Amino acid sequence: MRKCLQVLLCGSAAISGLAAASGAWAQADGPVQIDELIVTAQKRAENIQDVPAAITAISGAALQERGVASPVDLQFVVPSMQAGKLLGQTAITIRGVGLNQGSPGVAIHVDGVYQPRPSMGDLAQTDIERVEVLRGPQGTLYGRNANGGAINFITQAPSDQLEGYVLGSYATYNETRLQGVINAPFGDRVRSRLVIDRWDRDEGFVKNVLPNGQDVDKGQTLAARLRVQADLLENLTFDLGLTGLHGEGPTSYFTLYNVPTAGAQAVNPYLTGATVPLEPRRIAANDPIGAERDFASASGTFTWDLGDFQVKSITAYQRLADHEVRDDDSINVSAFPSERTARSRTVTQELNIGGQVGPVTAVVGAFYMRDSAFDQLHYDFPLGIFPLPAGSSLDHLSMRTMTKSKAVFGDATWNLTDRARIVAGIRFSEDKITQTQRTLLSFGPTPPFASCPLRTNDVAYKSTTPKIGAQFDVSDDSNVYATYSKGFKSGGWNLYACDNGFEPEKVTSYEAGWKNRLLDNTLIVNASVFYYDYTDLQLSQVVGLVRLIKNAPAAKVKGLEVEAVWKPEEHWTFNANASFLDAKFTEFSNIDSLDPALGTQNVKGHYLNNSPKVSSNVGVAYKTDPLNVGGRLTARADVSYRSKIYFREFNNAQDAQKAYTIVNAALIWDSPEEKYRVRLYATNLFGEDYLVQMDSSDNFGSRFVAWGSPRQVGLELKANF
């Protein structure tokens, strides 16, 4: 923590120096109250301080000021959150619970629409009004696959003014962004908002050490979103949302973290002389790497205001198509170049009714999802791979995975007195999964044969996830709460194995919290403690030619979180949070495929993946008085610290990322009346090298990893009209 504090002090000193240099130091004009923040985390509008749950909400203005552009960036704002990409997929964990492989363990919604695939979580997240991050299992209101929590992106709704903005930016690594927004009303009843966003990075973060080798972690995306709101009746509104995205570039990759093991070299001798760069963000891939992604969604939301009650219907259709070519050994031998094609179509429908009857405020609803997915993974083995001879190939085909999910739910708050409340909820869910698959294998030049003949597997899961708790107002500005709740993440069938299933994972949570507005509403301090009984954790491991999701029987998670925002006067704003986790396996034995000679290892007492003992995020901002030349300056620094993080259950030294600190900084000039903005920024200011994800494969006897982004410096210009 010493390094973290030193960096924070340096950042504060830098901000003070900037303010002094502007000649804009002013006498404090007294305290400035922090505005109330209204959230819809419980599917009804509430002051965030009144919600008996651990929630972090960030406004769109704060996201822009801090340069938060994706869920990966949120980890440096939200307590207990870890995020990173590996092979083009975004993995998110909260309090040690989340995605390893398979379905997301943290549910992501955009304008109330559930995103069923991990890769959907960071698509087209632009022009955001606010983000709400709910920590802890959200089995009652959000249901399936919300064991770790839920992240809600709420985009900017159309207004009744003709307005908009144009934003352009340039950063090192030849990264550019051009974004335009226009908001246009059509008469008194119809409003529209269109956003178009173009992002391009020509220079890859990950360099290829081979002469004329292909650099990776770069690409381009073009995204657009149209929202149209219409007042059909005085109390009935329809909201149409259309989103599209096309992306391409070498984004599906990894780098090796150790040279191939002696065992892997013995059975595949061509690995012995391979070039294996171990420096951060270096690759020696000799086979092509590239990816194309197309995403489209359409949603329609009816909101019917009946006075004491509100009826809401959200209907959505989403389509995602991915095509990837990968160098799946990442080194200068053609051990197993691969190609993957995946497509999915998802229809969701939610209907909920919320309102108040006497002392009870409640919401009840129903949810339905129909998700159809196709996945094909093809491997070539030009050099052979033990025990296959040269020229062999392998095809995993999941011709159709059909998931049908339905649920009914209810959540209520009963006001016993003006100060005391009971909260309760329950959700009944059913998931039915049908998968049709086969595997084709060829030995050298021989025709392929079905090592897994065509077959269809069915499975169904039913779950009941309750919540019960109590809340008490200690004063008008302080309340305490305690809750008991459960979460459920669906099981299923492994895509790349024959007749191989895995069980659902479950979380039972006990949480208590304390929320406070202090010092005449200039200081907010919230704290929560929690304990999880976590069973059948879904973990993945590559064994031979197959990635398998398997269940770890049990784990315990204990933790403490503290969040604070302080605005002592109009110039200064401070925000901070800290998380202390004790997340360990309590029952699990497994074989490390990188060191099978050790046999089955009992990893009881080992730390869960992506669960640092200590993590903290601290930010400070100073806003000047109006300058002599016009406008105002805002200087901001954000510091994030993580203690050691393990990425594999064996907790070896090479399974870990040592403690690290990330510093982001920005200097912003806003013109009079805030018509123009210039933002100079730096991310990862001191160029820290840190891992964000890790996996392993016994095929080439190595861990493979993804690194966090290097230092970038950029300039952003924005004009409002």
Image (cartoon, helix red, strand yellow):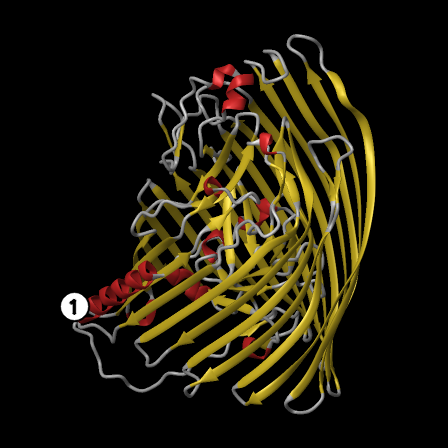
Position in image of residue 563 (x %, y %): 47, 71
Q: Is residue 221 visible?
A: yes
Name the residue nearer the viewer: 686 or 529. 529
| 596 left or right, relative to 660 | right
Residue at image position (64%, 61%) is: 112
| 575 left or right, relative to 433 | left
Residue at image position (70%, 67%) is: 485
Eyeballing the image, is 25 above or below 472? above
Q: Is residue 34 visible?
A: no
**How many numbered discs?**
1
Eyeballing the image, is 29 above or below 5? below
Position in image of residue 564 (x %, y %): 44, 73
Estimate how packed mark 1 is, as few (under 14), some (14 to 19) or many (20 or more) residues with alpha carbons within 10 Å: few
- Element under disc 1: helix
Which quadrant would residue 219 be assigned to in this image?
Answer: top left
Name the residue nearer the viewer: 331 or 259. 259
Quarter that holds the N terminus: bottom left
Quarter that holds the C terminus: bottom left
Position in image of residue 528 (x %, y %): 55, 72
Position in image of residue 254 (x %, y %): 48, 34
- Write down the residue under mark 1: 21
Name the residue type under label 1: Ala
| 385 left or right, relative to 85 | right
Name the residue nearer the viewer: 218 or 182. 218
Residue at image position (51%, 20%) is: 265
